[in-house]
Image (cartoon, rainbow, N blue to C red):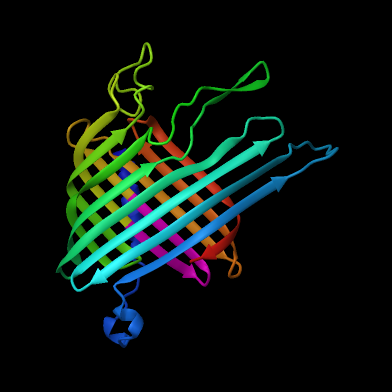
Amino acid sequence: MRKITTLLLFAFGATSAMAQDTSADAAAVTPDSLKVWTSKGNFNLLLNQSSFSNWVAGGENNISGTVGINYDLNYKKDDWTWDNKLIASYGLVKTNDANEKKTDDRLEFNSLVGKKAIGYWSYSFFLNFKTQFTDGYKYSMVDGVEERSDAVSRFLSPGYLTFGPGMQWKKTENLKFNLAPATSKLTFVDNSFTSIPDYVDESYFGVGTNKSLRYELGFYAAGYYKLNIMTNVSFENILSLYSNYLEDTQNVDMDYQLNVVMKINKYLSTNLSFQAIYDDNAFRGFQTREVFGLGVNFGF
């Protein structure tokens, strides 16, 4: 896990090194630059559909769709900054008579307050919240028939709330990282999952038997880098790492997100979303998801 984490940090740092300096003296003061609040957002809809009739090579009719929102609301005045980011997405796929399944389901909110210290550094306090919208299930084939289990996760089960003081290095809105050596992490679950007969202690997202909350204290590091590699093609990288001082410090939790947008015109683009998570309290291995498709986009 340490080797993987080191490799990801190296890759993130190498990409960040490509960023170019911009001079603050190059731009004159305009009315827009006097605004203390700035916002930008994007709504996208990805659609995919396949249909077959008497197709000798075989195939299965299906339709899928994913909706997503990526919204930033930032404040800056004198030595103070306050950055807020909301990421939400939800997708479904339906194949013939099979159960409809989720292809995406996440809700994440990030907020960070900063007070300028020196150079690009600021004193900071951050908050991160993550959960999902709807119930999650496991699927299996029994005698050739797909069966769905009872719900294994739902809204706020799990839910994660992470917060703490630290130091932020911020060169631009597109290149920044935050270090927080005294970070609290709360994991929320529905205790109906931890109260079942024969429940193995801490087997459900690390939460104890008959409990609905897990507390951790540790070191948190997060980085953000957005790069326009060419006209109308952007790569957005979001990386967070967390080590729990109270238990298995060597097991570093990792969450890496890559969002690639290749614009065709103002409203159409090809979008790729990739996420890799390592959290041994949830699953002893890497969790990955990838969504790719033609999207309809609306900026706001």
Tell me residue 210's x, y (percent).
29, 19
- Residues shaded magenta: 224-239
Residue at position x 62%, y 34% in the image: 100
Residue at position x 44%, y 33% in the image: 154
Residue at position x 23%, y 72% in the image: 77
- Find the residue positioned furthest to the left: 117
Along the line of sight, which residue is nearer the eye, 47 or 60?
47
Could you say which quadrant of the image residue 267 lies in?
A: bottom right
Tell me residue 288's x, y (percent).
46, 40
- Find the residue positioned furthest to the right: 54
Along the line of sight, which residue is nearer the eye, 180 or 63?
63
Against 296, is 252 above or below?
above
**Can residue 6 be seen by looking at this rendering?**
no
Against 184, is 36 above or below?
below
Main SS class of the magenta portion in the image: strand
Q: Quadrant of the N terminus?
A: top left
- Find the residue positioned furthest to the top: 198
Left-right relation of 50 to 87: right
Could you say which quadrant of the image residue 41 lies in?
A: bottom left
Tell me residue 38's x, y (percent).
35, 70
Along the line of sight, which residue is nearer the eye, 78 or 171?
78
- Magenta-colored stretch includes residue 131: no
Tell me residue 15's x, y (percent).
37, 61
